[in-house]
Amino acid sequence: IRGEYLYKLSDALGQKLLDPPNVAGWPGYRIWVSTTTLPERHEMTDELVDGTPRRFGRLYYSVKKPNSVDFIKRFPDPYDPVKLVKSMGECLTAFKVDAEREELFLATLLEGADTYDWNPDDPNAPRRISNFLKLIFELPEYQLA
């Protein structure tokens, strides 16, 4: 079922697996972004982060919900939210995290709390991490990189 899910998902995103338009493959950059594919891409990344099922026809396909706390603990200093958002942002995007972007990332991760209140072992941390990941995946720079 996983192969079928990936096949249907890639088709919905505009790239039919193993069937490129020509020997050069699929065109990239801004061709990827359209009023059809962008919402599909956002929905797909949200599904991956949340582990929610997707329906294709009569069948539902689901992915295992990732353990977001285990994921962030693989980054240096996961208990320091400033360092965490910077290192995660630079790992998951193709750009350097500037002060403005760092502020946006921090505000999303902390949800109004102070930096000293951040603790990845807090019961609310998985939701906050998921929201932060969704933000990164929906950035225009993420979509074009």
Image (cartoon, helix red, strand yellow):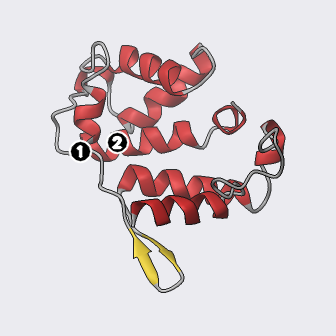
Look at label 2 and name its amino acid. Answer: Arg
Residue at horizontal 30%, vertical 28%?
A: 72
In the structure shown, which secondary structural element does the residue marked by tag 1 occupy?
loop
Residue picked out by circle 2: 128
Residue picked out by circle 1: 124
Figure quadrant of residue 40: bottom right
Residue 15, placed above or below residue 76: below
Q: Are marks 1 and 2 in contact (CB under 8 Å)?
A: yes
Figure quadrant of residue 23: top right
Whole-number angstrom distance, CA of label 1 to CA of label 2: 6 Å
Residue 87, placed above or below residue 20: above
Residue at horizontal 70%, vertical 38%?
A: 140
Quarter of the image with the N terminus is bottom left
Look at label 1 and name its amino acid. Answer: Asn
Q: Position of residue 144 (x, y in %)?
A: 72, 35
Q: Residues within 10 Å of mark 2 (few under 14, many from 20)?
A: some
